[in-house]
Image (cartoon, rainbow, N blue to C red):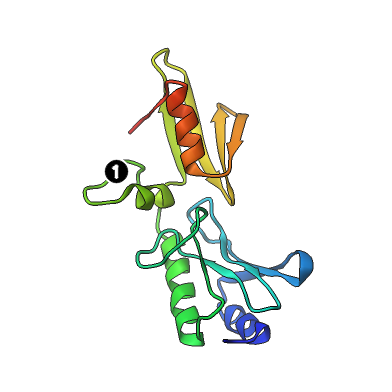
Amino acid sequence: MLSFQEKLELFTSFPKLTRNDVSMGRVNFHFEGSLHEKKTVVYRLHPNGSGYIFAGLLDGYETDDKGYTSIRDMDAEELRRLTSASIASLSKAPSAPAQEPGQSRAARRRRMTKSHWMNAEGNSLELRNEEDLWYLYAGLNLEMAFETYDEAEEYLLEEGFKPQA
């Protein structure tokens, strides 16, 4: 396992990433050129060696609900490859939220950064993923916040809203 210092040096070598020191000695690295709401590529890099990289738009990585995969035991080559792939994925314009043939529901959720919902009365809401939460807006007004897409989707469907293409 690479040390905290070795990981810091590796991530610092990416000129597109900006270092952000956070609480308890942890460090995040942001990609300000992201075309998605998500800008954090390296999340909670901790002096004990744990941390996460955003892989929510990539295939082949086991991710949490926020799209992050653990980097604790990755070697330098794996970290460079994953970091480059993460930056590349965030450099591409977001895909439409509609389900593509053969695309799993989980993959669709990870790719979605915002979607529009409408009910039978014509009321419209927008669901947006911003960093770690899903926010529901009615125009410019924040209506609710959810920890996961599934919670937001369940609420919207229960309230009679349907996703718009």
Q: Nearer the viewer, residue 4 or 17?
A: 4
Percent across and percent down for residue 67 are: 49, 58
**Given the image, on which type of amino acid does mark 1 rest?**
Gln
Q: Residue furthest right?
A: 24
Vertical position of residue 34 compared to residue 162: above or below? below
Quarter that holds the N terminus:
bottom right
Which residue: 58% across, 51% down? 131
Q: Which residue is mark 1?
A: 99
Mark count: 1
Vertical position of residue 156 compared to residue 113: above or below? above
Which residue: 41% across, 19% down? 119
Q: Residues within 10 Å of mark 1 (few under 14, many from 20)?
A: few
> Circle 1 — which element?
loop
Report if residue 110 is visible in the image. yes
Asked where in the image residue 11 lies, by quadrant, the reply is bottom right
Percent across and percent down for residue 21 are: 73, 68
44 on left or right of 64: right
Percent across and percent down for residue 97 are: 36, 42
Q: Residue furthest left?
A: 101
Percent across and percent down for residue 28 are: 65, 67
Quarter that holds the C terminus:
top left
Which residue: 53% across, 61% down? 33
Asked where in the image residue 13 lies, by quadrant, the reply is bottom right
Report if residue 94 is visible in the image. no
Which residue: 36% across, 53% down? 107
104 on left or right of 155: left
Vertical position of residue 147 compared to residue 1: above or below? above
